[in-house]
Amino acid sequence: MGQTPRMLQPSLSERHFFGAELRRLRERANLSQARLGAMIRFSADLVRRIETADRFPSREFVEACDRALEAGGALTRLLPLLEESRNSENMRATSPSGSGNADTLLPTHLKEKPGVAGMVVRVPFQPGVLDRAALDWLNAAADPRPPVVGRPGSPDQVDEEDLHAAEIALTMFRQLDHTHGAGRVHAQVQRYVEGELNRLLANTPTSETVGRHLYTLAAGFFELCGYQAVDTGAHGLAQRRYLRALRLTEAAGDRLYGSYLLAVNIGHLALHCGQPEPARRMALTAVRGSETQATPAVAAALHAVVARTQARLGREDDCLTHLDIAERQLDRAKPKDEPAWIGYFDAAYLADEIAHCFHDLGRPQHTQRHLGDALTALSPTHVRRLAIDTALLASSLATAGRIDDACATAREAVDHAARTTSHRCLQRIVEVQADLEPYRCEPEVREFGEYVRHRLPLAAV
């Protein structure tokens, strides 16, 4: 009897992602590892080790697999990302460790230029800019000017194959970001945007459909860049990235994705920056501007953000009204009828949003119940979300006076946060310590403070 193939975790690294893609394509072609190895003139053991991420593949191996599996360049296009990952691992292996260095949270491409990182982080979030952006989006023409289409056979045209490769890269970057936080992945995403994505945007699409798809895909990259900027503490940069993504959805005529960016990304950013009123306006504008197009899951996500803003403003009745709408909408959602980018928004994610609402409203028992639902269903690869939600649970337990439980839960949050390079995780651990401050004389709280200083010194207070 053959061995059961080892489960792969594509979100762990570029190498793991490649291994998972190779196995998927090999199994789609109904080939064993030995048969594929014979076809490409490499050993079956090497195929196995590359599939399980024990080895980096060579260029020759990748190109041979691409041909044998008729992947149309999908594997070859991952080569630059693999080579960059291999170089990064080699650099980490030869560099002295510096876990206590604050620079580890900064994007690599900014650390290469002294002073630039600090300037980028200090670029301020500007809530006054948002109302004009929301108004422009609300008044955007329902049928924007179609993308310019190139002549058939023209060189450097963008086709569906180009977009498929970019979608694979975006999927991989999102998975890596969920697992590791932006500190590690941000520079690679930025280089991809500055290189491959900008090349695609500079060239002409083969059809209007391809052009609209390209703009929507580009919006996805800038959304991810914005999310990662939040995760590194660069809130002004995040605002600019999100607004760029919003303009791209206007060019694509993608009203639904635009409403999501306005509420979920820009609204959440405003909340994160302590601006609940602008956040409320953004979320309500998104709701009103997409009423005729919003699918149930998207509508649920939009109303959840409105609820978050109302909770932050202390308006409990309004918050509960929008949470009720969000729950009823999500109950109606059918995954096959929803856009792919909203697929993450399920009952567990809504439970997370509800928990944050109740935490802001000062209702710890409700917070703990909904966080239990969210954490139980959360994928173990979403390490940053595990860290943030576990830390919020610890804060809620502290608010309820359950200090022993709060400290034990907070330790778990620290362990999760230590596996990421995420400014948001550090910030949440700092907030837990602030919530425990009234009990600073308790031995459990003192021990927890020592644990933070040892395990996650950047978050120590």
Image (cartoon, grey):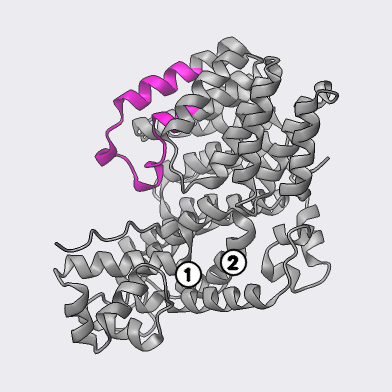
Secondary structure of the residue carrying tag 1 is helix
Q: Which residues are magenta?
A: 322-351
| Residue 75 forms part of the magenta stretch | no
Residue 304 at least partly seen:
no
Viewer-nearest of labels 1 and 2? 2
Residue drawn at 16 percent across, 72 percent down: 31
Of the numbered discs 1 and 2, the one sitting upstream in the chain is 2
Read off the residue under disc 1: 201
- Where residue 41 appears, as percent x and y from the top left, is 24, 89
**Residue drawn at x 64%, y 72% as measured from the top left:** 92
Q: Residue at x 36, y 74 (%)?
A: 50
Q: Amino acid at mark 1?
A: Leu
In the rendered image, residue 323 lying in the magenta stretch gets the answer yes
Quadrant that contains the C terminus: top right
Instruction: Name the amino acid, label 2.
Output: Gln
Q: Would residue 158 be visible to someone looking at this image?
A: yes
Question: Which residue is labeled 2 in the image?
Answer: 190
- From the viewer's perspective, is residue 129 above or below residue 358? below
Up-down relation of residue 108 to residue 311 (above or below): below
Give x and y (percent) for residue 96: 73, 72
Left/right of residue 170 with respect to residue 336 in the rendered view: right
- Front residue of this view, candidates 103 and 271: 103
